[in-house]
Amino acid sequence: MKQWYEELFENYGMKYDNECFTQGTIGECDFIEKEIDYDKSLRILDIGCGTGRHAIELTTRGYAVVGVDLSDSQLKRAREKASVHNLQVLFQKHDARNLPFSHEFDLVIMLCEGGFSLMETDEMNYQILLNASNSLTQKGKLIFTTLNALFPLFHSVKDFLDSSAKEGNAKCGSISFDLMTFREHSIVHAEDDLGNKKELHCNVRYYTPSEITWLLKTLDFNTIDIFGAKLGNFSRDDKLSTEDFEMLVIAEK
């Protein structure tokens, strides 16, 4: 039986690119470039690359990027977009829980919940972090965003999602948050690129900053910095607060 995140992204490439949370690519890539000192010799792995928006933008700027995703339809859309711009981007189908890379990349990015935090168990989410770590070179850097567990303690997730959704975007309903597991359960209504309507029972994990720090320490990251993640406007000046739906994590070996 397919998990909700496998069903959602089937034939969803066009719709995905119109979702409100995918509109910050340029600013996010500006931040990534700054974090690696504009060094075009570095190799970048984009885990959960989706339709390739970060991978394509970074390739346009002269970086060598490999994008991996679980969804055939997302990868198809990514290859089409790269082809339109005459770009050579290596897009591969892989499950983030089982990656083949070993110390090959100087930077790994996982943005906009590209796998991590979507898994149905904490062990699976940890496996993704482990694989990201194993993909890095000795002095590599990991940049990712994840759901901030401090947010739903103070705010309604439904109100937040409703306020940013546009016509045609996926809609969340029946949202509940489990304080024992820090998991949000919801029903998502979406329509794919072919006009098929879907009702999906979703289950995602929110993390506290201290959990993320501990998990990354077990994977031998030496420096771990956590900030608020503002769409399209990542910054080390953005101190994490209870107002941030997502947090930005920067970890170095």
Image: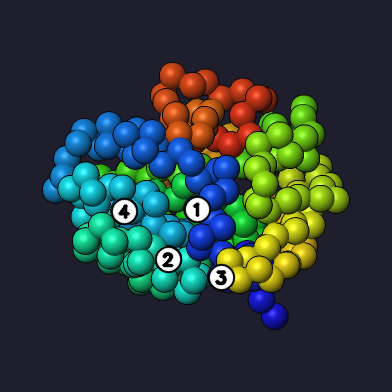
Find disc 3 in the rendering and name its residue: 11
Q: Nearer the viewer, residue 236 or 136?
A: 236
- Asked if the residue under mark 4 is in contact with the one under mark 2, i.e. CB atoms within 8 Å, the reply is no
- Mark 2–mark 4 distance (CA, rounded to whole Å): 12 Å
50 sits left or right of 20 in the view: left
Residue at 35% in and 66% down: 80
Find disc 2 in the rendering and name its residue: 77
- Mark 4–mark 1 distance (CA, rounded to whole Å): 13 Å
- Asked if the residue under mark 2 is in contact with the one under mark 1, i.e. CB atoms within 8 Å, the reply is yes
Instruction: Give the foreground label among 4 and 1.
Output: 1
- Mark 4–mark 3 distance (CA, rounded to whole Å): 20 Å
Name the element at disc 1. helix
Instruction: Give the foreground label among 2 and 4.
Output: 2
Find disc 4 in the rendering and name its residue: 56
Disc with the residue nearer the chain's start (3 vs 1): 3
182 sits left or right of 169 in the view: right
Instruction: Give the foreground label among 4 and 3.
Output: 3
Looking at the picture, which amino acid does disc 1 mark?
Answer: Asp
- Asked if the residue under mark 1 is in contact with the one under mark 4, i.e. CB atoms within 8 Å, the reply is no
- Mark 3–mark 1 distance (CA, rounded to whole Å): 12 Å
Looking at the picture, which amino acid does disc 2 mark?
Answer: Arg
Disc with the residue nearer the chain's start (2 vs 4): 4
Residue at 79% in and 54% down: 186
Q: Quadrant of residue 84?
A: bottom left
Q: Nearer the viewer, residue 92 or 191?
A: 191
Residue 63 is at least partly visible in this image: yes
